[in-house]
Image (cartoon, rainbow, N blue to C red):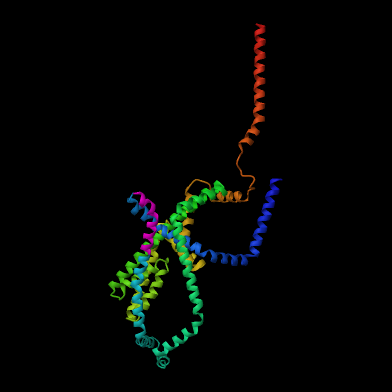
Amino acid sequence: MDKNRISTIKTIFLIAFLALVILNFTNILNNLGILLEVLSPIMMGCVIAFVLNTIVTPIEDKLLSRIDNKFMNKIKRMLSIVLALLISFSLVFLIMKLIVPEVKNSLATFVVQLPDIYEIVKKEIIKIIPSAQENLSSTNLNVQEIANKGFETVSAWAGGIFSLVNSVFGVLASVVMASILAIYIVSSKETLTRQFDKLFKKFIPERIIKPMYYFFDVSNSTFKAFFTGQFIEAIILGVLCTLGMAALRLPYASMVGSFVGLTALVPMVGAYLGCIFGFLMLLPVSPFKAMVFIIFLLVLQQIEGNVIYPRVVGSSVGLPGMWVLVSVIVGGGLFNMVGIFFGVPVTAVIYKILKDQVNSGSTKIADRVENFIEDMTKDPNDDGDCDCSTICQNLDPKLEVLTNQENKHDVNIEIENLSINKDQ
């Protein structure tokens, strides 16, 4: 069949496929959402495994590798996983132990002081807006009435408690299954790597495997650097918040600073969640101190967002500060919180690949894409490799012709020599 005709048929099939995708785009998205919901525990397990492996690797390579014996070599991986889990759970336990009792006490204080806070806020509003005095004076705050209203509201929602509990248990079950899967992945990561390597080499052409492995390598190093940098940045922000609150003589400095550091694990916007929490904690103690805390943390957040975060996280993933801010803005606009969290590492991977392509003298990206499409659309029977038998078959007639010509040339030379000898 003519090559042009084959190319035309492939183009027609490609256009028809794209048309079907466009016409059924809504159904595809719905089915994709169902598929993602089913696969969410597996994807969550892979994410947990990646984060867990970041802790397991240094424990195994730097700490336990110093103990060299047969028994330790057998249990080194599992012991590293156990130590990593203990470290993670210990950090969570310490933070919760530090935060939860203070939150409980603060809420109790807030309920007791709610009438006084209301009077203070009312006086401040009257000072700013005198015309609001009549409306506010006719409004009396009754804590018992508020409590009764709250109880009635909770009773009205009681019908949905069962579904809420069911959803919570479903999420917990998914987290437990994902955690178990993550432990299996980390414990047998070398075996899984070999299996996938054999699978890829069996079914994927070599020219695609190399760029694919390069992409995996860049993604792995970038995401590891991102999580490490994000953790360091959260510690820096939590320490600065604690020290600043202590210098300003604000209460709950260590507790609020720990919570701000915890929420700072969410890039750029996490500290604002800590700001709201700290404000609610300080409001029952002193509205003035609560306002001082907001001003302090807003200033600290500006320094963190424009100076600390781009330098710590941006430098760790090799991304300039401007692109860090752009990735957070664009990622948040497109995918909300998920985009905010993963926008920086994804942008860093793209930036790294583009930078390597621009700085290297190898094949351009367009050529690689063209080669990739060519490989994906190529006839499976035409693997593009030259067979040795085919080469020999093509060369045999040419060698025979060359041999015959050489023999004829030798015969002519012999005849000429005989003629010369005869004349002599």
Residue closest to the eye, 270 or 224: 224
- Residue 43 in view of the camera: yes
Whether residue 164 sits left or right of residue 388 in the image: it is: left
Residue at 49% x, 79% y: name it: 161
Measured from the top left, where is residue 413 in percent x and y?
65, 16
Q: Quadrant of residue 272?
A: bottom left
Query: Where residue 139 appears, x then y in whole percent?
Result: 41, 92
At 66% across and 61% down in the image, what residue appears? 19
| Position of 372 relative to 385 (above/below) | below
**Camera-side residue of 152 and 261:** 152
Residue 307 in view (yes/no): no
Quadrant hosting residue 87: bottom left
Inspect the magenta stretch and tell me whether residue 78 lies in it. Answer: yes
- Tell me where residue 219 appears, x and y as whole percent: 47, 55
Residue lying at the far front in this picture: please name it: 71
390 over 207 or under it: above or below: above
Indicate the quadrant containing the C terminus: top left, top right, bottom left or bottom right: top right
Q: Is residue 395 magenta?
A: no
Q: Which residues are magenta?
A: 69-88
What predominant SS class does the magenta segment belong to? helix
| Residue 208 screen position, x and y as percent | 55, 49
**Up/down of 413 relative to 228, above or below:** above
Quadrant containing the N terminus is top right
Task: From the viewer's perspective, tell me whether residue 243 is left or right of residue 139.
Answer: left
- Report the label total: 0
Taking depth in this image into account, of 263 and 302 the one nearest to the observer is 263
